[in-house]
Image: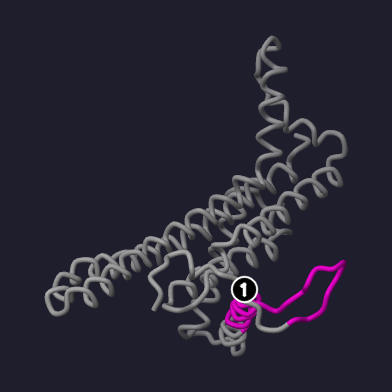
Amino acid sequence: MTLDPIDQFSINNFFTIGTIGGQTIAFTNSSAYMLLTVAVICLLAVRGFKKQELVPGRFQSAAELSFVFVASMIRSTAGEDGMKFFPLVYSIFTFILVANVISIIPYTFSVTSHIIVTAAFALLVFFTVLIYGFYKNGLKFFRIFVPSGIPIYILPLIVVIEIISFLSRPLSHSVRLFANMLAGHITLKVFAGFVVLLGTSLGTIGWLAGIVPLAMTVALTALELLVAFLQAYVFAVLTCIYLNDAIHGGH
């Protein structure tokens, strides 16, 4: 067991698929865990909706609860018109949630601790808002940069701030998820490393002293489960808020 807390984020190639423009395209451990995440989601969905029962079982209850939860989130932030984006929001929420939970299992890999993955989701949301906003509202979409009720003498400053805020959304959207998951996994590895280090260097006394960091590791693991859900929820809520600008940007 390596004590380097950063080693757990290493990308390892399993096999090479080909090359494009001199760049090697490989199937990596990150790719494998993303496929595993999708497989788990599909398995749970099939199990939950394979047989609709009047009195739902555990899997059906979990599946229906997740649908109702995401639908309520969309309606409360983007209105009834936002339900057309339910497949997008639900897919993002479930992927991030399942990937986060899988990554808490020891010796697994954290997909969402890599900025390239979270940035891909953030850019997907950003360009969806941009394209649909102009498609639905035309040039009226620019009204999102001009808040109502602003005095004319500070309006130019507010417009500049709004534009900068809008363009920085992919950065804040992606870094929030990436940084929280990265920090959580590093903290878990550090405390777990204390247990091993004390035990191997001080023998019996070290293993006894390792009870404290071991307890902290267990407590942090429970906290990481909560963070796994909260980060998926926050990412999905922000997605709904941004989609609301596209849906009602001309009003």
Does the stretch in magenta take in 139? Answer: no
Give the residue furthest to the bottom: 51
Residue 119 falls in image quadrant: bottom right
**Residue 78's spot in the image, x, y percent?**
65, 48
Q: Residues within 10 Å of mark 1 (few under 14, many from 20)?
A: many
* Rendered-image quadrant of the C terminus: top right
**Which stretch is magenta?**
16-42
Query: Can you say whether 136 is above or below 208 in the image?
Result: above
Picture residue at 79% right of the left edge, 46% below the top: 130
Above or below — where is 166 with respect to 14?
above
Residue in the image at 53% along x and 63% along y: 69
Q: From the viewer's perspective, tell me whether residue 147 is left or right of residue 72.
A: right
Q: Foreground: 215 or 153? A: 215
Q: Position of residue 87 (x, y in %)?
A: 69, 66
Q: Which residue is mark 1?
A: 30
At mark 1, the secondary structure is helix
Give me the residue at 56% from left, 69% from top: 10
Task: Judge from the rendering whether residue 51 lies leftward or rightward of residue 100; answer left or right.
Answer: right
Task: Please state if 29 lies on the left or on the right of 133 as rendered.
Answer: left
